[in-house]
Image: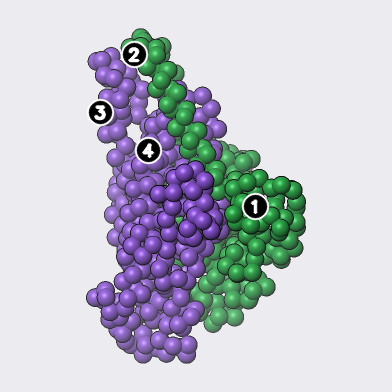
Amino acid sequence: MKGIRRWGPGLVLVLPSIFLIAVFVYGLIGWNVKVSFSDWRQAEETTGFSTSAYSELFPPGTDPAWSESVKHVLLFTGAFMAGTLVLGAFLALLLDKGVKGEGFFRAIYLFPMAVSFIAAGVVWRWLMNPAPADRGTGLNLAFDRLGLDFLANEWFLNPTWGAAALAIPAIWALTGYVMALYLAGFRGVPEELREAARMDGASEWRVYRHVVFPHLTPVTLSALIILGHISIKVFDLIVAIGGKQFITQTPAVYMWILIFDARDAAKGAAIATILLVAISLLVIPYMIYTVRTERRT
Amino acid sequence: MTTTSAAPPVPVPARRTRRPRARRTAALSFKYVALIFFVILVLTPLYILLVASFKGTAEADPSNAWALPDAWTFDAWRQAWSELRPNLLNTVYLVIPATVISTVIGSLNGFVLSRWRFPGADVVFLFLLFGLFIPYQAVMIPLAQLFAGLDFPTGIPRLAFAHIVYGIPITTLIFRSYYATIPEDLIEAARMDRAGMLRTYWSVVLPLSAPAFVVTAIWQFTSIWNDFLFAVFLVTNPESWPVTVAVNNTAGSLVAEYNLQMSAALLASLPTLVVYILLGRFFIRGLLAGSLKG
């Protein structure tokens, strides 16, 4: 039973999936690139070649809505990654050793992952209501009642830092997930290594600092890739909180507006292509790296 | 991708007391204080959702939003239910077939790509896997065009089809990693008995697959239930909108009282929350396995 008679049926079984992915992932990506290089700039479909969509996006600055969107997504990404990584690692550190009720805490911290960004957006939009405390709602009102007025702010409507405020619900949603990654990472460090360091008289903190943390580079790397990939294309959350407002717009939201309101398919497709390129630059090296490590082990 | 699975807990040998007991107690209390502080932070939005959803219209004034309701009422829930019912049903009609079909496809693919391999199986796996990472925006415009061009049945069938196709990478990934842990001897034994591929799958592999089915089904269920992007791009007829789109519209309209908005958001989240509460263990496993799908 060697050869094709042995492995042939397997290939046949997977062929439909290969076909579907070839058409709907690779084929449609190609089609999208083609649309982005077309002159389809109004409701009626046209197929002539044109680079006009890209020339409005590059260099940034030609189209203020686009450059603002890019600025917003960069600020959002920075705040989101820093927030989730720091808080997630901190929670994992707290839970790593000797805490009773670990399962309970873990379950609470992870529950936001089960909630859609839309539902989360509904409540966070209300919590981050920008009205000042005297007629305020949400967090501004709570700050006022707690005597923390100085914390009250205009949240996502702040012209400079608004995008960072938008990251707060995303941090809320994904910190538990980063915690779970780090916790698994901590537990993956062989106990003998920790014990050996302790025998040498290292304090518990130094055990983490010199034994555990160096083992976590791969975990941090995957967390960064995963979070970055979520962040670049962020859409639902922004729509749920800010709607179509200019001040909260990200590239994915701008693309949506272009297609449904401005009927500008070429420019929408161009932005989608840019998102794809940005994410591929992040993910493809990581995929290659992961496959290589998988082969080595 | 992230195959960091938790190692079995290693028993910690009793060790010498190095620090004075008082300092250790202080450190431990700090831990609990910090942990409970974060529990409160994480649960705050849920608290707001819950108390608002049980308030009557008269009480639904933002200025007392942090307070518990004076008079508990189901009015907002009832109203949310009557408004969202058609959309909840749409989501159910979408999520059940899409979850079942994509889970079965994932199982077959995962089996072949790990245990009934053909030459080039790894390349095929990478080829499929790339679909996991793409931002769906990059296929959305042509996908809508293609559906229109093919006269594909509108509404839920389009959405279900899209979720099944774009679910192939993640479901294949979870099953492939899981089947890699089945001992090769079992497969070999079946081969010795001259069992064919489907026979081996049916009588050897499938009976061992329950955990992977649960993990994958929960993952697909949650992400399809919560999807918004495909829904707004592919479904133009409001009658076919799944619940996420309806909730977003309720919340976006200025006339909706905020207690209604909150009960709508909560109602739309209940099924995934219930699944999480009942099967959280598997949910977390799915997260760690399929973490690259945002």
Numbered circle sitting on residue A89: 4
* Mark 3 residue element: helix
Which chain contains the residue that carries disc 2?
B
Q: Which percent across, then down, holds residue A50?
A: 32, 86
Q: Residue at x 53, y 27 (%)?
A: A101
Nearer to us of marks 2 and 4 is 2
Q: Amino acid at mark 4?
A: Ala
Residue hosting label 2: B19
Which chain contains the residue that carries disc 1?
B
Left or right of A252: which side holds A200?
A: left
Chain B painted colour: green
Q: Which percent across, then down, holds residue B71?
A: 74, 48
**Residue, far top:** B16
Q: Amino acid at mark 1?
A: Ala
Chain A painted colour: purple
Q: Amino acid at mark 3?
A: His
Residue hosting label 3: A210
